Image (cartoon, rainbow, N blue to C red):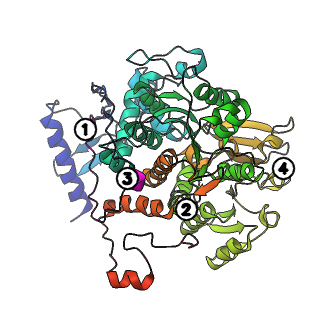
Amino acid sequence: MSVQVVAAKMAEVELKDINSKSLPAAMPVAQKQEEKSAIKSQTAAPSPSPAVSAAAKVAAAPEDPTLPTPSPNLMKMPAASVLKRTEPQHNGGEAFISPDGTVTEAPKTVKKQIQFADQKQEFNKRTTKIGRRSLSRSISQSSTDSYSSAASYTDSSDDETSPRDKQQKNSKGNGDFCIKNIKQADFGRREIEIAEQEMPALMALRKRAQGEKPLAGAKIVGCTHITAQTAVLMETLAALGAQCRWAACNIYSTQNEVAAALAEGGFAVFAWKGESEDDFWWCIDRCVNVEGWQPNMILDDGGDLTHWIYKKYPNMFKKIKGIVEESVTGVHRLYQLSKAGKLCVPAMNVNDSVTKQKFDNLYCCRESILDGLKRTTDVMFGGKQVVVCGYGEVGKGCSAALKAMGSIVYVTEIDPICALQACMDGFRLVKLNEVIRQVDIVITCTGNKNVVVREYLDRMKNGCIVCNMGHSNTEIDVASLRTPELTWERVRSQVDHVIWPDGKRIVLLAEGRLLNLSCSTVPTFVLSITATTQALALIELYNAPEGRYKQDVYLLPKKMDEYVASLHLPTFDAHLTELTDEQAKYLGLNKNGPFKPNYYRY
């Protein structure tokens, strides 16, 4: 079939379409630009899930090999409002068809081009709120302060006022919280409901808590990342009988809409995205220093909350039953206190539990490192030279992800065992000063301080991306960059150019703070594993008889690690093999576990 015949048939279809719209017969095929107003869906905000009673002493519950898949009774999410915009197709001039079927194209005219330019100007001048939100979101999605559905609904004028200067109350008249905007609660509630679907173990704990609540009477003060996943944990703790007050452990990781949903649900939350250092400590103090309420349990991530209580309110430890810590940095601080004889309550090291190390640190970072780098820099990984500082579980995850994307990955390490693992995994082990001039991306994940100092920053190539995947912001010497001869240029949220006098610039992400939770998100399912581990550790310490745990740091019992894993297996329709009596006797094991000794390395 010839090109002319095909073109003629296509033109006939277009003419039929035009005739069906009752256009004049003599009118040429003209281009029009239509704008349809958005349909706003008016839906009532779902109410928070009611507290469900818990089974007595969940921590000591027997293993259930036939555990059914949890099916939380979630509310249906309202349909999102739809915004459509039809753009004209620019095919040159106007099409005409001669009687013999030949298609010809009229020459382009200046008038047509001028008309389109006017239309474009008119489009850009539209000032409807929905238009501004949609356009801003489509152009600079990665530059928004919160990477969630509610981000585009934040009023810019609201961002200029510090939450500490506002007087906000929820729908019940309660004002014991300090967040960005309580009006975002509906959007936060929807995000929490989505997270619940990917956190089967916590939902199973809620469902099983039907008798005596194992955390009844517990007053938990927490300092963690405030995200939708943390909200599921907090609401689970409340369902198990606990009272909670919460602050953020990172000034950039708070999801404002989730904090609003928690405040609307009655939780005392003090956090917002973009806190100052002064705001950070003020929020922690507001959680702790409250009249008529004193905590008896601590859930910490990084050790800042524990440090603040030791520094400001040491007498509180007389009534505190235990500390649960989940980060490398926080655990290191606890061991220092224990060694110095200053740890006056039992502490549970959740970070070194198998489920936390392997799933949160390894599998989570393997996915979130790529997400964080893409959202902030739009970098292509193929062929890039990357140095990963530290080859622990986080470093292993980051290195594996970047290698799979085609990057050339170098590794630095102080531990010969981890170093040998890096070599066996196909990575070149180097010292940082050997490759600092040539690499395109520098990633720190050691938990140490001054890993990347000013000397290395001065020697980096133009355009080098520098970021941190460790919990603390001490790994990159950001303070050394705040000098008069260097210029800071904000590119977008959490992305800065630091420019040297000769014009060289590096790209610094999240000002050296935790990349994945500051600049992107992390997989909810992995956080379900960590959150379940935290909940069981709190239950264990709170219900432990006096004398079981001394003033020291303990690992989560192996039986609990296995229990956390078993709660997540139904999601994959996985079926565990059971030992026969003869096999269990041969191995010297209990048929229900634990299946590995404490010294076993997975």
Instruction: Decide whether the magenta segment is chiefly helix, strand or loop.
Output: loop
Disc 4: which residue? 454
**Residue type at the position of mark 1:** Lys
**Residue type at the position of mark 3:** Ala
Residue 96 bears which disc, if any?
none
Cα–Cα span, label 4 and label 3? 45 Å
Q: Residue at left 70%, top 73%?
A: 419
Cα–Cα span, label 2 and label 1? 33 Å
Please check the rendered image and state whether residue 74 is part of the magenta-colored stretch, yes or no: yes
217 left or right, relative to 81: right
206 left or right, relative to 347: left
**Residue type at the position of mark 4:** Arg
Image location of residue 177, percent across then percent down: 51, 23
Q: Residue at left 53%, top 54%?
A: 368
Q: Residue 383 versus residue 426: which sits nearer the camera? A: 426
Q: Residue 71 versus residue 8: which sits nearer the camera? A: 71
Residue 76 bears which disc, if any?
1
Disc 3: which residue? 201
- Secondary structure state at the residue bearing disc 2: helix
Q: Which mark sits nearer the N-terminus, 2 or 3?
A: 3
Disc 2: which residue? 362
Cα–Cα span, label 4 and label 2? 29 Å
